[in-house]
Image: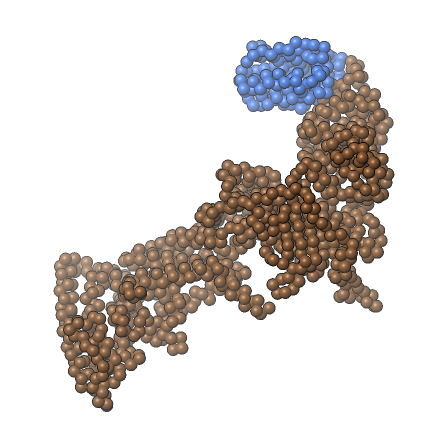
Chain colours: A brown, B blue
Amino acid sequence: MSEEILKALMQLFAILSKQDDGGQTIHDDYVKEFLLSQISRDRFEFYYEQYIEYKNQEPSPTGDASRTSVKDSVRTLSICKKINKTLSQKQKSIVLVRIAEFVYITEEISQLRLELLKTIGDVFKIEKEEFRSIHAFSAARDNAAVLSDTSFQRYVDRTLYAEAGEDCIQKEGLQGILYFCWVESAGILLFRFRNESNVNLNGLQIKEGKTYVVSDGATIRTPKASIFHSEVLSDLRKRDKVENILFHGSIESYKFPNGKVALRGIEIVEESGTLFGIMGGSGAGKTTLLNVLSGLDPTDQVKVTLNGFPVSSSESKANIGYIPQDDLLMEELTVYQNLFFNAKLINASWSKEELDQRVEKVLRDLGLYEIRNIQVGSPLNKKISGGQRKRLNIALELLREPLVLFVDEPTSGLSSKDSENVMNLLKQLAQTGKLIFVVIHQPSSEIYKLFDKMFILDVGGFPVYYGNPIEAVIYFKTLTHQINQEIGECGTCGNVNPEQIFDTLEDKAIDDFGNYTQTRKISPEQWNEFFKERIVPPVSDTSKPLEKLTSVRIPGRIRQFAIFFKRDLLSRLRDKQYVLIAILEAPVLAALLSFIIRSSSNGGKSYTFASNQNIPAYIFMLVIVALFVGLSISAEEIFKDQKIIKREKFLRLSRVSYLKSKFTYLMILSLLQSFLLCAVGNSIIGLQDNFLYYWILIFSVFVFGNVLGLLLSSSFKSIVTIYVIIPLIVIPQMILGGAMFKFENLNPSVGGGNTVPVISKGMVSNWAYEAAMVKQFTSNAYESRIYEYEQLISEYNYRTSYLLPYLEDLLTNESASAASDTVTNTLRFEFSRRYLPEEKKRKIEKLSVEEAQVLVEELKEFYQDRQNELSRLKDEHLMVLEEKLGNDQLAAEKNGSDNEDISEIVQNTTTKNRYFVQNNTVFQNYDFVFMRDHLDPAFQLKGNLMYVPVKAAFGQTIPTFWYNVIVIWLFIFATFIALYFDILKRIMEIKLFKRN
Amino acid sequence: MEKLFIAKTEDTPEIDFCPDAKEMKITGRSLPEDVTTFYAPVLEWLDVLEETPSGHFKLIVNLEYFNTASSKLILDILMRLEDIHTGGSNTIEIIWNYDQRDTDMEEAAEEYSELVEVPFTIVGI
C-alpha cells in the first residue's frame, strides 16, 4: 500500500468516525491497530496524527451535526476517485471490507456512516450483490444473523447444525461458527468466526469479530478442527451447483518400454476447482506421471478416467488440455494469429465470428490483448516477454475450454515476477472450476501456497505425500522428529519453505567420522511405507452427478490441410529475410554459374552456344543446384514444428494433411525457384531450346529435394545433424550422376563399365542429367531437323565400319571350323533384329566359318547400300532446308543450339572402343543417343545404356525425357511414403534401442 | 429539446433546465429518499443535450445542502457535463453560488471544481 493511499484512508476513517456522535474511542483503536498492521511503529505517529487532525476539523457554523456536511461528502468522493485510479478491484474490495468493518464496530449503527459506506461502494464500482454480501458480512452481529444469511459459507458444530439446517456444513470438533464470504469479482475469501477460542489463521492467533482475508493455500485451525482455503471454495462451488468433474487416476505400476518401473502405487482422485501440484526430485517421474495422467502417453498399464470416460477416449481428450514445458508457438505469427489458427484447428463448428470472439476473450482474460498484433519471435530474438509466451501457451489450451489442464513446469525459465503471474493465472482458472495438474520445480513460498493439493514423488516413482501443501512440511518434520513440528509456515512472515521437504526427504546418512555418505537416511521405499501407513488414499465419490462430456468435431482433412497451409504460408511470408533468400537463391546461383562458364572454344571469336565446352557441366550443375536448394530449404520445415506436431497429434489432427500442406507449400516455392533457375541460367548461357522441358525436369528435382529434406527433418533429433547429413546425400549424387566421372572409369566393383551401374540408378541426379542431355541433343533446333537421318546413318555406319569388319577379323583368325560363339550370337541377333527388313531375316543356329563369312558379307553390302542411300537423302534434305531457310539461318541454328560437347558425350565419340564384347556378344559402344536396338526384345543389355533416346516400359516406348521424369516422381512418391510412416526415424530408433 | 422542470419540495431541489435560455439551474436542498430515481430525468436530459449541438450552456447551482448520496449523483452530473464539454457538441460553464457564511459548501464546491475539467466559477453570495 502506498503512502498516498494510506493518507487517503486516514481521511476516510476520520470522516466516517466523526459522523453523528462525533466518533468513539473504539474507532481510534481500530485505526491504531490497522495502522500498526500496515506500517512500522516509527511512521505510525505521522499517520495517526493525520487521522486525528481530519477528525477534529471544525464544522462550518451553518452546519447541522445531525447531517453529513457537504464538505465531507464531496471529500469522500474525491478520496475514492483517487483510490480508483491506483488500486485494483481486489484491493478496493479489501478497502471496502475494512470500511464496512469500521462502520459496524460501534454498538449503535449510524445511518450517516452507512450512507457514506454505500456511496463509497458506489464510487468503487463494486457490484450490487457483492456490496450486499460484504455489507451483510460485517453487519451480521449475532448467531441468528449469521445463520440466516445463506450467501455465507458457514461451518458449524452439531447442535447449531440441527438448528440452522441444510445450508450450513457440519464440522466435527467445532464449538461455534466459522463463516466465510466469497467475493467473486475480486477473488477474495473473507472469514470471521463466533463463539470459538484459540483460532489460528496460518499459525497466527486471530480475534473474534474481526474480518480476515483468507489467502490462497491458507489453513485455519481451531483447537479441534482445521479447515483449508481450497476446502471452503470447493464447498462453495458445490453449493452453486457447478457441475462437477471427477478425475480418477489409478496406477498400480507403470513401466517404461525398457522394463524399468517408473511409477508405482499411485491413486489420485480429484474434483473441479483444484490446483494440484506434483513435486519430486529430478528423475522421480513427475513428467512421466503427468504424461500418463493426461493420456499424452497412451498406455494400457494404468486406469485413468475423467467423469467415467477413459482418458484416451475422444470425450476425455476434448476436455483435457496439456501445456508442455516448451513453447508451442509459431514464431513468425502474431499472438493473435497463433491463437486464431489454433482455434480453427480445434473445432470445426465454430464460425468466423465465434472464433474471433473466443480468441479475443482469451486474449483479454490472459492480459495479452495489448500485444495481440505483435509477432511472437523466437526465445532468443524476443518480441514478447517470457511470461507472455507462457501465458500465450496457456491461452492456446484455454481456447479449447478444457475441464482438466495438465501443465509441465510452467515457471521454468521465468523471472520470479512472471512465475508468480503465471501461477496466479492458473490459480484463478482453478477457482473458476477447472482441475489443474502442475508439475512444479523449486516453487517459491508464494507459489507453493497457491496449491490446493500437493503430490510428492520420490526417486523411482514412489509416492511419498498426497494432501495439503503446508501440511506436507509438517508431515515430513514430524516423521523425522524435527523441532517446531507443528509449524508449517513462518509465524511472522508467513513463508513456507518447500525446500525443507526435499532436505528432509533426501537427507544423507552420516558415517562415524561425521562425513555425509551417499546413502540416504530414509530410502524412497521407506518413505513410501510411511505414505501407505499414514496417508489415507482418496476414494472417488460416485454419488455426485457428473458433467456429461462431449467430444468436439475437429475439421476434416481437407480443411485441416487448408488451415495448415495458410498458417505456414503466413508464417513464412512474415519472415522477410527468408522470403528474399528463398526467391533469390536460385536465380543468383544460376546467374553466377552461367556467367562464369559462358565461354567459347572457337579461338576467341564471338560466343556461340555450340562451341561452349561447359554446357554438359552446366546442365549437371542445374540438377545439383536444384537438389541442394530443394533439400536445404525444406530440411528444417518439420523439425521446427516438432513440438507443435506432438500437440496436434494429441488433438487428433491428421498427419497427412500436415505433410501435404508442407509439401504443397514447398512445391509452389519450387515451381517458382525452378522457373527462375532455368530462366536466368539458360538465357545467360544462350540455351534457347526446350525451356518448358528444363523447367519440368528441374522442378521435379527440386521437389525430390524438398521431400527428402522433409524426411530428414522429421527423422533427426537435432538441426545440426540434419545439416551435416545434407552433404552425405548430395555428394554421392554428384559422384554417381554420370557427369563428373564416366561410368567406364569407375571402380569395377561398383559395376558400370559400359553400362549404368546399379547404384547410379538410385541417383536422381543421374536420371535428371540423362533426361536433359538426351532432350537437349535430340530436340534442339538444328538436330531435330536431321535426327531421323542421322539415327539411321549411325545405325548403318556402326555395322559397315565397326561391327561387320570386326566379325570378319574374328572369322579370319578363327582356327576352328565352326564360327565362335561371339560371332554366332552376334549374327543371330543381327539377322533377327526388329529393324531388319522381313525378307532379310534369318534363323541362325550353328554356323561354320565359311557360312558366317558369307552372312557377314551379305549384311555388309546391305548396310553399305542403305548408308549411301541415306547419306544422299540427308544431303538432299539439307539442301532443301538451305534453300528454304537460307544458309545463314541454318548455320545460326547450328551455332545456337547444337552444342558440340553435348554431342560428343551423348554420342561417346571420343571412345577408343566403338564396340565391346559381353556375354559372347558384340555390343555397340557409342552413339547410344541414336540407338534403337535396345528396344528389341532379344537385346541383352536392356535399359542399361546411358543416353538412349527412348525407353520401354510395360510394352510401351516412352521418350527418355518423360521416362526419367516419371522415375523421378516415383522417387518422390516413395520418399513421401517413407515420410508418412516415418520409416527412417523408426529404423534409427530400432537400432538405438538395440544398442541400449 | 424540451424544457425540464421539477418543482422544489422540502427534501428535493428545484430543477429548471431550459434549452432556450441555455441555462440549467439546480436550487434548494437535496436529500431525496431515492437519489437515483430523482436524478434519472436530469441525466437523461443531459444525454439528449450531448446529442444536440446547440451552443454554450450554463449550469447554475444554488444548493443549500446535499447529502452524501446526492453528492455522488451531483458528481455524476458534473462528469457528464465534462464529457459534453470535451466531446465538443456544446460548451459548458458551471457557476456555483453559495452562502458566504457556509465555508463547508465553499470547500465542497472547490473540491468538485478540482474533480472535473470544466470552466467552474464559485461565487459567494
Q: Nearer the viewer, residue A344 or A587?
A: A344
Q: Residue at x 29, y 81 (%)?
A: A920
Please determine whether, in this image, residue A449 is positioned above or below residue A523: above
Which quarter of the picture shows residue A138? top right
Is B7 above or below relative to A897?
above
Q: Is residue A685 visible?
A: yes
- Residue A18, image x, y percentages: 81, 23
Residue A378 in view here: no
Q: Is residue A724 left or right of residue A851?
A: right
Query: Is A851 left, or right, of A3 in this rendering?
Result: left
Residue at 20% across / 73% down in the picture?
A797
In-front residue for pair A762/A731: A762
Task: Identify which residue is drawn at 66% across, 42% down.
Answer: A545
Which residue sits furthest front?
A543
Q: Which quarter of the figure is the C terminus of chain A placed in?
A: bottom right
Residue A429 left/right relative to A15 = left
Report how many numbered discs are placed on residues in the image. 0
Drawn side of residue A532 relative to residue A931, left or right: right
Give the quadrant of residue A749: bottom left
Give the x, y percent position of residue A700.
37, 58
